[in-house]
């Protein structure tokens, strides 16, 4: 039996790169193609297993949508136009329902306390096309009880 090893196969430039450089190159290529494929990439290296995960995100110039859980204190009506509290009427939000909102914006003040904050509704069936007055929500983490004395809006919710 011989102790002669077979010749080592020459590594190509790609396989010779450390895994984190390979990931960086893939991420850069996907991000550069963002205008074509409409995606940017983020990569995470799981050092424990040596695996690499590339996550394709939203198009360049847009961030992943962050939403916030908010609960209404009664049935809330929804509208396409927050500046007039009108436009097309959408499905109402059921009493004491918790839904996802995308952001807050100033619009038509409600008559009882002049609260002009509105939420853009992210949950289905509104899907970002409808708004509801923030006055109908607890805005403080509560999910039941009276709305009297609750804040005009949840300060955690970003501006639109």
Image (spheres, helix red, strand yellow):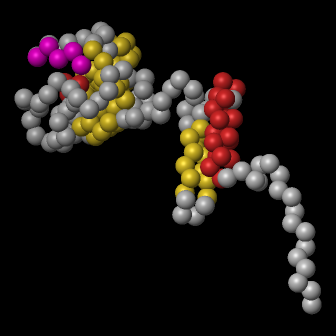
Q: Residue at x 30, y 18 (%)?
A: 105
From which residue to which does the magenta span run? 113-117
Q: Residue furthest top?
A: 84
Residue 114 within the magenta-colored segment of the rendering: yes
What percent of the width, then of the height, locates residue 81?
A: 36, 13
Location of the C terminus by quadrant is top left
Q: Residue furthest front?
A: 3
Asked where in the image residue 39 lies, by quadrant, the reply is top right
Q: Residue at x 23, y 29 (%)?
A: 155
State whether residue 118 is above or below residue 141: above
Of residues 24 and 32, the one nearer the viewer is: 24
The answer, for residue 131, to whether it is visible in the render is no
Q: Is residue 108 left or right of residue 38?
A: left
Residue 149 within the magenta-colored segment of the rendering: no
Q: Residue furthest left?
A: 149
What percent of the width, then of the height, locates residue 75?
A: 23, 31
Of residues 12 and 62, the one nearer the viewer is: 12
Q: Is residue 50 left or right of residue 3?
A: left
What percent of the width, then of the height, locates residue 110?
A: 18, 15
Q: Residue at x 76, y 54 (%)?
A: 15
């Amino acid at each position: 039996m011989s102790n002669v090893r077979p010749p080592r196969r020459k590594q190509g430039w790609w396989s010779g790169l450390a895994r984190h450089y390979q990931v960086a190159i893939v991420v850069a290529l996907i991000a550069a193609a963002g205008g074509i494929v409409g995606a940017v990439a983020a990569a995470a290296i799981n050092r424990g297993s040596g695996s690499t995960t590339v996550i394709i995100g939203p198009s360049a110039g847009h961030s992943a949508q962050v939403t916030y859980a908010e609960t209404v204190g009664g049935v809330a009506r929804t509208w396409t136009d927050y500046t007039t509290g009108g436009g097309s009427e959408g499905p109402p939000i059921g009493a004491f329902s918790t839904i996802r909102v995308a952001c807050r914006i100033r619009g038509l003040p409600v008559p009882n306390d002049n609260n002009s904050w509105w939420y853009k509704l992210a949950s289905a069936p509104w899907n970002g096309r409808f708004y509801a007055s923030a006055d109908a929500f607890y805005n403080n983490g509560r999910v039941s009880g009276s709305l009297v004395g609750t804040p005009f809006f949840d300060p955690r919710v970003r501006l639109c």
